[in-house]
């Protein structure tokens, strides 16, 4: 009985995710679901991307947190349209929450929506939001053993940011092992080591996002 309930929840989520997918498709928007544990640097990376890409690509950010509007305030300060979702305790975003957030965004004026999921390395992987891609941030201070311990998050991601490389020499993080373990789980994973605070190593990620946005625009 319990298993059936869980599977029904996932099925209901998938139906709404499909509707979101169609909304993105019709509007020609590339939507990315950005996941990580709390504090890995999702919002800091989004602030950096807003600075680097905000004047070139019409982007918006949907912020998912258990409580507060702190992250959406950080993004709004960069001049990027943003909507805050508070899950009130829920440990991941669900498609219905994103559907409601989309009502507050000027979809016809956007090319890119990045959705910052609730900080959690487990549940977000199971709930599609209708995004074209999922991506994951692992920060150096979390340890290089995380790909093997949380494989589902890595398996479902199109790219992995390894953030806080400015702390590499202080955190005992084995970059080579993290990269090879992550690729053993998801061989096609694109991997971008960078420092969001120092704005170092961002260029390959920015090119990746640019290409995605352009390929979707090309299909309009
Ligand atoms: N040293 C260092 N700290 C970072 C970096 N990126 C983020 N941080 C810090 O990590 C903390 C959590 O960052 P935040 O972006 O709020 O993480 P989120 O919870 O994943 O959104 C903040 O104190 C950031 O300043 C980085 O590249 N290097
Ligand atoms: Mg955040």
Image: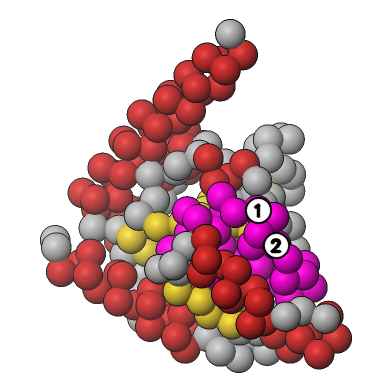
Residue ID for mark 1: 150
Residue 59 visible: no
Identify which residue, 82 or 43, lies in the foreground: 43
Q: Is residue 21 left or right of residue 190?
A: left
The residue at 56%/89% (across/down) is 201
- Label 2, label 1: how far apart the Cα atoms are: 6 Å
Compared with residue 184, is residue 140 higher up or lower down, i.e. above or below?
A: below
The residue at 70%/85% (across/down) is 165
**Residue 197 x %, y %:** 69, 83
Q: Which structural element holds mark 2?
A: helix
Bin the neighbour count of mark 2 within 10 Å (Cα to Cα): few under 14, some 14-19, many 20 and up: some
| Contact between labelled residues 1 and 2, with CB atoms less than 8 Å apart | yes
Q: Which mark is residue 180?
A: none
Q: Quadrant of residue 90?
A: top right
Identify which residue, 153 or 130, lies in the foreground: 153
**Residue 182 x %, y %:** 57, 67
Q: Quadrant of residue 198?
A: bottom right
Q: Coloring scheme of the render?
A: secondary structure
Looking at the image, the residue that sits furthest to the top is 1
Residue range in magenta is 136-161
Residue ID for mark 2: 146
Q: Quadrant of residue 14?
A: top left
**Residue 179 x %, y %:** 58, 76
Q: Is residue 106 left or right of residue 75?
A: left
């Amino acid at each position: 009985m319990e298993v059936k309930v869980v599977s029904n929840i996932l099925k209901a989520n998938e139906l709404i995710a499909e509707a979101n997918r169609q909304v993105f498709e019709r509007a020609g928007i590339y939507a990315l679901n950005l996941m990580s544990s709390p504090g890995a640097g999702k919002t800091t990376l989004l602030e950096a991307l807003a600075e680097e890409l905000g004047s070139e690509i019409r982007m918006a950010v949907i912020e998912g947190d258990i409580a507060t509007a702190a992250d959406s305030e950080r993004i709004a300060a960069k001049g990027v349209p943003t909507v805050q979702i508070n899950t009130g305790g829920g440990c991941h975003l669900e498609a219905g929450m994103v559907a409601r957030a989309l009502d507050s965004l000027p979809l016809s004026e956007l090319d890119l929506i990045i959705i910052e999921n609730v900080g959690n390395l487990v549940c977000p992987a199971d709930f599609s939001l209708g995004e074209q891609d999922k991506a994951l941030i692992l920060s150096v201070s979390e340890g290089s053993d995380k790909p093997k311990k949380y494989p589902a998050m890595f398996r479902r991601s199109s790219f992995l940011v390894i953030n806080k490389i400015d702390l590499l020499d202080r955190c005992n993080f084995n970059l080579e092992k993290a990269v090879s373990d992550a690729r053993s789980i998801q061989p096609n994973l694109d991997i971008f080591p960078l420092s969001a605070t120092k704005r170092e190593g961002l260029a390959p990620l920015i090119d990746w996002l640019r290409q995605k946005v352009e390929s979707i625009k090309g299909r309009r």
